[in-house]
Image (cartoon, helix red, strand yellow):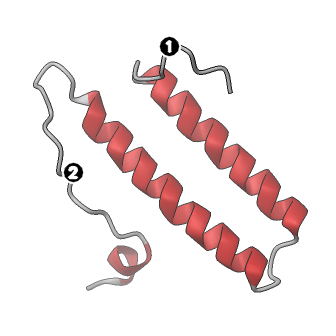
Amino acid sequence: MDRHQFLYPHAPYHGTVAPEHPEVLLFDANLQEFAQRVGYISSLETGGKLSPEEAYTELKALWKKLKQSSKELGIASQGDST
């Protein structure tokens, strides 16, 4: 296993993807990246390498990026206001 695979593991999508909705796979990859980075940020904050404010700022930016991705892919929920 190379370093990139170790640091950024990617699990295959286990759901069913309809041919007319390939954006589901892309969003799954974005969601996995989000989850991985949240883990890193929380570990850095817990270990004292990031302040709580820095961690919050980083997490908020990641959330906005994921939310923007869902909107661009057209899979944002209708009632999503956050």
Q: Is residue 30 left or right of residue 48?
A: left
Which amino acid type is marked by label 1? Gln
Nearer the viewer's eye, disc 1 or disc 2? 1
Q: Residue at x 73, y 46 (%)?
A: 60
**Mark nearer the N terminus (1 vs 2):** 2
Residue 62, given in percent of the width and then of the height, sits at 63, 48
Is 16 or 49 nearer to us in this picture?
A: 16
* Circle 2: residue type: Tyr
Quarter holding residue 1? bottom left
In the rendering, which numbered label is found on residue 26? none
Under circle 2, the secondary element is: loop
Q: Residue at x 86, y 66 (%)?
A: 52
Question: For this view, does 39 lie left or right of residue 50?
Answer: left
> Residue 64: horizontal and vertical position, in percent?
65, 37
Residue 53's spot in the image, x, y percent?
89, 60
Q: Which residue is mark 1?
A: 78
**Residues at badges 1 and 2 in contact (C-beta under 8 Å)?**
no
Picture quarter containing residue 67? top right
| Residue that protrudes farthest toward the top in the picture | 78
- Binning the other alpha carbons within 10 Å of mark 1 as few (below 14), some (14 to 19) or many (20 upward) gives few
Image mark count: 2
Identify the residue position indicated by label 2 in the image: 13
The residue that appears at 48% across and 20% down in the rendered structure is 77
Q: Position of residue 47 (x, y in %)?
A: 75, 86
